[in-house]
Image (spheres, helix red, strand yellow):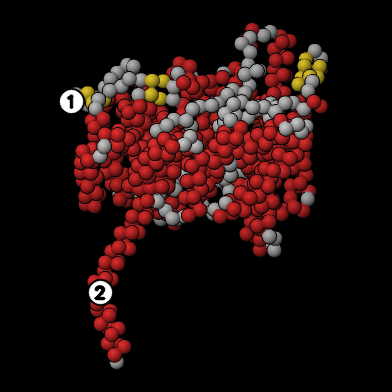
Amino acid sequence: MKKALLSTILLLMTVLILPHIISPFMVYLSTEILVFAIFAMSLGLIMGFGGMPSLGHCAQFGLGAYTVAILSEYTANIYLLLGAAILISLCFSLVTGYIAIRNKGVFFLMITLAFTQVLFLITSRMKFWGGNDGYSASVTANFGFGEITSNIGLFYMMGFFFVLTYFLLKLFVNAPAGKVLKGMMENEGRMIALGYNPKTYKMFAYLIAGSMAGLAGGLYIYKTQFVSPALFSVHMGAEVMIMVFIGGMGTIFGPALGAGAFVFLQNYISTMTDRWPLILGLLFIAIVLLKRGGILHLIQFVSTFGLKLFKSSRNAPVDKQVKGKEQAS
Amino acid sequence: MILHPCLFKKYTEEVISSKVFILKGVEQVEFFIANTVSGLAYAMLLFLMAAGLSIIFGLMKIMNLAHGSFFILAGYVAYSFSRSGMNFWLSMVLAVIVISIFALIIEKLLISRVHGSETDQVLLTVGLVFVLGDLALWIWGGNFLSIPVPALFDYSLDFVGMTFPAYRLFVIAMGILFAFVLWYFEAKTRVGMIVRAGVDDMEMVSALGFNVKIIFSGVFIFGAALAAFGGVLSGPILGMYPMMEWEILVNSMIVVIIGGLGSWKGAFIASMIVGFVDIFGRIYMPTFAMAFIFILMVAILMVKPTGLFGRVES
């Protein structure tokens, strides 16, 4: 709890200071990064802590986005809109989770992917909501203290939600329920023998992840003002998955880092070549073949290694003295 | 985030006529039969895909998401061969051989490294789908391509006043033939026996002295060749277009889920169900066609979580 609070405050400080030290374009890009960070963290929860790989996690994201886009015709109240986005994706998660969680691993993946494909096909045929061409909505965020239109304002709005979801996730993972969930992933048989029902805990994590993705989808609209069936495409699901992997699976903050690296890389590479899917695919394959974990694992490794080095350098003279004495004698 | 353009084309638009609902009596029956033929042809293509997918998972415990890419790549390769002047049959054989060799390389280089880790398999094969899809886009472009119908079957059969395209009937015949060959192979031959035993307990098979690596490679190539065969067969019917690999993959995954992993009989029956529901759903309720298949899948999973004829615990 203390540690979670500390890291959250640190993150909050970073989010507050960041837009004042980076270029305006980076602020614009970071807004997107923050949305995808929320999305990737939600997938990171079920993949890294629940052992439920999902290629169809973009369903909840897309549903959140569509909900806000469609309902924004009737109301501009952001609390209502985001609430509806969360609620709809929660309901969707409830239905899909009930069916998918009975199965493990690849079967889970196939079922969630199939659900997402259904949404993809339905939205791409729905002429009413734009069909294949997508649906543009004009939404402005207003939390009751003025409309947020500037890039920095949007950045802070996304940043606030990012820090909030980070804190909640951190609380959940450190809570007994989160520990049980991780235990399920590592050794389900033992947890069942200890008297825990795996389905309940997995479902709970799945619902949290689903509603978080819905929230991220809702926020996404405030940045892009546009939804299209591509939100439900396998590409989207795979991209989030790669964010989780680049960042580091099994950590909370890792996927957020991965989202940052991914969006940055994508923007950078897209300016140079059209062959982005090719590079993305090669990235996937490279990550699997190298088997080195993500960015956060690297940072953790370097920091622990550095700490060891630091300690050993302080002890070095003593060692040398001992060795010197041994040689002398 | 750059959103990828949706390049989906509806391949059955030719059968969707605006007059569906005003057809009466005999016409209705004719329409029904004509679409049954389309549905069956589609089902057979799905079966060829799903059989490979199912046996690869059943035996190797590998979820090969790149299976759809084999399907579509075979179509593209055969298209190139036939454009260079070869006839349909030769280009089909060559395409199947090319894809089999390609599958062997992929199995040896990449797939064999990710045994046991599901997330690695998913990442690796998804990466492969992206790479192969983008390479295909690079080489063959983003337009809708289709292989010309072979001259041997380029006519329609007239039967009690109805016309059937001969090529679709040929595809159905090939599907049934292959179902029979697979059944014979699985039930009556020694290799089939080893494969069946491997689905149940691979470790025991390896303890009995069979070379697991060769069995794995063999099954993987066989599955890829089946998909490639289906891909070439589908060339004149469905054609090839970007992102098609996902569509065909998801449909055959649903077939595998409904039919049960590791069962060819299940794959055959489930592909018939999915093929019919897909074709008729597209005609009567185009928006929700997929949803029908889906409701069916959910209903079956509720009753029997391993699928209709599942041998492998999910």
Task: Using the image as rendered, state which of residue A305 and residue A163 is in the foreground.
Answer: A305
Can you identify the residue that label 1 sits on?
Answer: A145
Quadrant hosting residue A151: top left
The percent position of residue B152, horizontal first and vertical second, equals 81, 27
Q: Which residue is mark 2?
A: A315
Q: Is residue A137 left or right of residue B77?
A: left
Q: Is residue B126 visible?
A: no
Residue at the farthest left position: A145
Element type where label 1 sits in the image: loop
As measured in the structure, the alpha-carbon distance from the residue carrying label 1 to the one carrying label 2 is 58 Å
- Do we see residue B96 in this rendering? yes
Write the residue at 28% across / 64% down. Answer: A307
Q: Which chain letter goes with mark 2?
A: A
Q: Amino acid at mark 2?
A: Asn
Looking at the picture, do discs 1 and 2 lie on one chain? yes
Judge by depth and name the residue closer to the eye, A4 or B236.
B236
Seen at 55% across and 43% down, the residue is B128
Using the rendered view, name the quadrant where residue B16 is placed: top right
Does dot 2 land on a helix, a strand or a loop? Answer: helix
The residue nearer to you, when weighing A121 against B291, is: A121
Task: Decide which of tag 1 and tag 2 comes sooner along the chain.
Answer: 1
Q: Quadrant of residue B66?
A: top right
Q: Residue A116: x and y, percent?
A: 48, 32
What is the chain identity of the residue bearing mark 1? A
Q: How many marks?
A: 2
For residue A195, above or below residue A320? above
